[in-house]
Amino acid sequence: MRANSHKAPMVIEAFAECEVDDDEGWDQIVEHFLPKNAPNGLLQAICGVYAAKRLVRQAEIDARKVKQDGYINEFAASKFRIDPAVYALSLMNAEDGSDYQMAAATENQVIFAGMPHASIAEIQNNLMAQNVYPERLEIGTLSCLGALVDYLKFSEIKQPVVVLELDLDIAYSFIVSGEGLLASRLLPQGLKSMIPVVQKELGLKDEGSARKLFFSNTFDFTGMGPKLVARLINELQSSIGFFEVQTGQSIGHLICSNLSSKLGWLEGVISIQMGVPSIEMNLKPWLESRGVSFSADTADMEITREWLGVLSLMPRYDAVQTEQKEAE
C-alpha cells in the first residue's frame, strides 16, 4: 500500500497484494512502488511483521515492585517462559497501549510486547534483501489489536471481540473491546495440528501430501472443518468461558486476523462451531476520522477487512486523543 506520507494525515494512493510465497509478484510490487529517486534503490516502508516467537500478552503485575531491579524480567521469564535477555521488550498500558511509565507506576494491568533480537535482525536482513528499507518495524499483532480497539470505540460496539491469530505451531487468542486488551492466551493448536486430521480423513499416505493439499486452496475442506478445529475450539471455549464468568461479559464477535486468503474459510468454520458471528467492519469512515483518506484512484475501491493488518499501521490514535482532550 502506498501513501503520500509516513504518518497521518495521509492519502492512500495505491493498493497491491500477492500471496506470501509469490516471489515474482512481490518483486513486481516493490518495483511498481519504488520511486525513481529512491535512496540506494530501496523502497522505504513501514512494516508490520509476525515473528514466530513474538510476545504480545496481557498480564497483571505488582505496580509497587516495578522499580525493583530485575522484577520485570523475572516476571516475564516466569509468566511467559522466555529468556528476557534475548528479547527486545516493551511494557504498555493495557487500556490504551501507551508506554508504561515505570517511574510513576500505578497501574497493574499491562501488555508485554516484544520479539527476539535475532528475529528482528533476520526480518530486517530479509527485507533489505528484497530492496525494502524498514523505516519502522512493528509487531503486526500489536498494531492490529490497537486498530481493533480504536475501531470498536469509534463504532460504539460494546460487546468484546475474540481475536484469533493462527500460526503454524500455536494460536494467539485475545479478547478486546473499546476499553482495551482484556485478556490474552497462547493455545497449543496451530495450523499444523490440523494436518494429521486431513491425512486421516482423506486417507493420504503421508503428512507432507496432506500439508501441501491443505495450504494449496485446491480442495474444499469446509465439510471436515469441524473435525479440523475440534481441539482448537475446546481450548478456545475454555478460555472464553473463564473470561465470561470472571467479567460477566459475553463475547459478541470473532475475527481471525492473520489468515491468508487461501485459508479464509477457517474463520467461518470456527465462527459456526463457537456460535459467535464474524465481525463486519466498515473501515473507510473510521480511517477518515483518523486522518487517513483516499486518492481519486483508490476512492472507489472496496476496503475489505482483509486489509486491516496493513491499514492498522497508518492511523495515529495518540494524535486523535490529544485533539479530543484539547477540545474538552
Image (cartoon, rainbow, N blue to C red):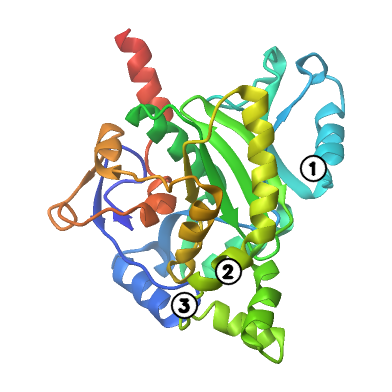
Q: Residue at x 56, y 50 (%)?
A: 164
Q: Residue at x 57, y 32 (%)?
A: 181
**Picture layout, residue 189 above or below residue 28:** above
Q: In the rendered view, does 208 fall on the left or right side of 14?
A: right
The residue type indicated by label 2 comes to: Asn
**Picture layout, residue 281 above or below residue 134:** above
Q: Is residue 313 visible?
A: yes
- Check residue 80 in the rendering and tell me which mark sits there, or answer none: 1
The residue type indicated by label 3 comes to: Asp
Q: Is residue 56 visible?
A: no
State the residue lying farthest toward the left.
296
Assign a secondary structure to mark 3.
loop
State the residue lying farthest toward the top.
328
The residue type indicated by label 1 comes to: Phe
- The percent position of residue 234, horizontal first and vertical second, equals 69, 51
Assign a secondary structure to mark 2.
helix
**Which mark lies nearer to you, 1 or 3?**
3
Residue of label 3: 220
Residue 239 quadrant: top right
Q: Residue at x 28, y 43 (%)?
A: 282
Residue 64 quadrant: top right
Q: Going from the N terminus, do you reach mark 2 or mark 3 first?
A: 2
Q: Are marks 2 and 3 in contact (CB under 8 Å)?
A: no
Q: Going from the N terminus, do you reach mark 1 or mark 3 first?
A: 1
- Check residue 126 in the rendering and tell me which mark sits there, or answer none: 2
**Picture layout, residue 211 above or below residue 56:** below
**Which mark lies nearer to you, 2 or 3?**
3
**Which mark lies nearer to you, 1 or 2?**
1
Assign a secondary structure to mark 1.
helix
Q: CA distance from mark 1 to mark 3?
A: 37 Å
Q: In the rendered view, does 149 fall on the left or right side of 69?
A: left
